[in-house]
Structures are given as C-alpha cells and as structure tokens.
C-alpha cells in the first residue's frame, strides 16, 4: 500500500490548482463554524455557496487543463465530506435528532472508505465519483441550506427533508458497493477473461 501512495504523491500530482482549491475548502470550515455559532446565517450560507462553487470550479479546471490526479480524486471528496459533517453537527445543535443522521453519515463514509481502499489495493486504481454520489451530495447541501435560510422551519419538515437525504445516500451507497464489488470481481478474473472484443468496448 505504501508504494501505491508514494507513486501518487509526485510533485506533478500534488501541486495543482484543483488540489489547492480543495485545500482552500478545508480551510474554510472553521470560518463556516464561526459564522454559524455567531448566528450569522447569511454569512454561513455565503461561505457554503462559495465552497460549493469552488468545488465546481476545481472540477472544471482539472478536466479542462488535464490536472486530474489520483490525489485530487481523494482530496476533493475529503473536503466535501468534512464540510458536510461539520454542517450536520452544527445543525444538530439546533435539531438533536440530526445526531442520528450524523451517525448514519459517518457509517456510510467509513464503508465507502474501507471498500475504496480495498479496491485501490487490489486494482491499483482510484475511481471518480458517480452521478448518484453527486446527486446525494447536491440534495444534502440543498436541504442544509434550506434549513439555514429558514430557521423557523418546523422540526417535522426538517426531519422529512433529512429522511429524503438518508434514502438518497443509502441508494448511492448501494450503487457504490456494487461498483466496488464489480471492480474486485473483474480484478480476480484471469486476464484472458477481461479482454473484450473491440466493438464491445465503450467509446
């Protein structure tokens, strides 16, 4: 595992604009917390939106200027998950039932991490996020922003909104686990079995 990590931590892969943006998003987290604690909801929302827009920007830059790296594939979701978990705990200070949601969130991410590392070790590859993972992220951010911008929202409505997040996150987890299982199964097959006819390959 160590040699796989060292291979991906080359200067070319580490010092990129997308990785710097992901680091900036991590550095924004304490400011988001400070704004939330001070009951500056508009500032909190503004910082979250800035973080989200910078996330979109680093993806565009990475693809446009060929700066996609395995480190970036890891650092980007770390910045996402750290920001999301921080916001969940902030909101849980107002809605205590969200601690259960936080527990579910942590369990999901631990499963994703364990299986992701297993795939990395067995296949020597890091996979980018899929549409279902992005959909779960967008929904979660949308719900959290709505709760922040509407502080008088009834707890029952808030609970329903986060229940929708749980369902989407559970669906995306199932899809990722099936994807990882497929990758591990393909890696376990003899190399001759992995060769497909030219016309059957995706363009």
Image: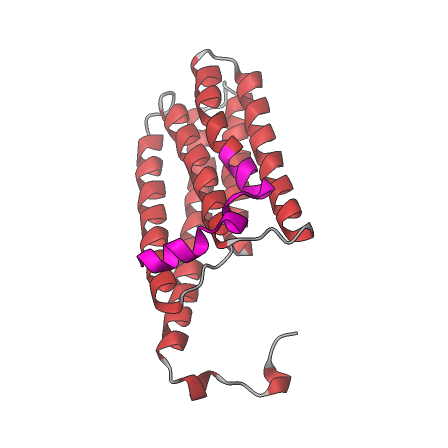
Query: Measured from the top left, where is residue 110 in percent x and y?
Result: 32, 48
Residue pictured at 49% horizontal, 39% vertical: 140
Total numbered circles: 0
Please state the extent of the stretch shown in magenta in the rendering.
1-23
Q: Residue at x 41, y 76 (%)?
A: 186
| Res 192 → quadrant | bottom left
On whether residue 7 falls in the magenta region, the answer is yes
Residue 170: x and y, percent?
Answer: 40, 51
* Left or right for 99, reference 50: left
Query: Above or below — where is 37 with respect to 26?
Result: above
Q: Is residue 35 inside the magenta stretch?
A: no
- Residue 73 % position (x, y): 49, 51
Tell which residue pokes out farthest to the top in this image: 38
Question: In terms of depth relative to the viewer, which is nearer, 6 or 84?
Answer: 6
- Residue at x-position 39% and y-position 75%: 187
For the stretch drawn in magenta, the main secondary structure is helix
Q: Position of residue 20 (x, y in %)?
A: 54, 37
> What is the basis of the colouring in this image?
secondary structure
Q: Quadrant of the C terminus?
A: bottom right
User: Would residue 10 appear left or right of 149 to someone viewing this image?
Assistant: left
Q: Depth check: 181 or 94 in front?
A: 181
Choose between 52 and 16: the one closer to the eye. Answer: 16
Is 87 rendered above or below residue 136? above
Position of residue 70 relative to residue 144, above or below, is below
Residue 160: tell me if it is visible: no
Specify the quadrant that holds the N terminus. Answer: bottom left
**Residue 36 appears anywhere in the view:** yes
Toward the front, the furthest residue is 11
């Amino acid at each position: 595992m160590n040699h796989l990590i060292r291979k991906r931590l080359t200067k070319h892969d580490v010092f990129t604009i997308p990785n710097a943006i992901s680091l900036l998003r991590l550095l924004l987290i304490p400011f988001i917390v400070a704004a939330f604690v001070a009951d500056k909801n508009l500032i909190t929302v503004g910082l979250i939106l800035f973080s989200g827009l910078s996330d979109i920007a680093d993806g565009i830059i990475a693809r446009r200027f060929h700066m996609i790296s395995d480190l970036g594939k890891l650092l980007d979701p770390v910045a996402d998950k750290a920001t999301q978990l921080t916001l969940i705990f902030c909101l849980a200070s107002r809605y205590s039932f969200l601690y259960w949601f936080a527990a579910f969130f942590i369990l999901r991410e631990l499963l994703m991490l364990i299986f992701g590392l297993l795939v990395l070790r067995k296949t020597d590859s890091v996979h980018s996020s899929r549409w279902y993972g992005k959909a779960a992220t967008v929904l979660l951010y949308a719900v959290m922003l709505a709760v922040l911008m509407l502080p008088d929202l009834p707890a029952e409505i808030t609970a329903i909104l986060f229940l929708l997040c749980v369902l989407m996150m559970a669906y995306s987890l199932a899809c990722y686990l099936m994807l990882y299982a497929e990758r591990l199964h393909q890696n376990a097959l003899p190399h001759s079995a992995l060769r497909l006819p030219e016309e059957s390959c995706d363009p």
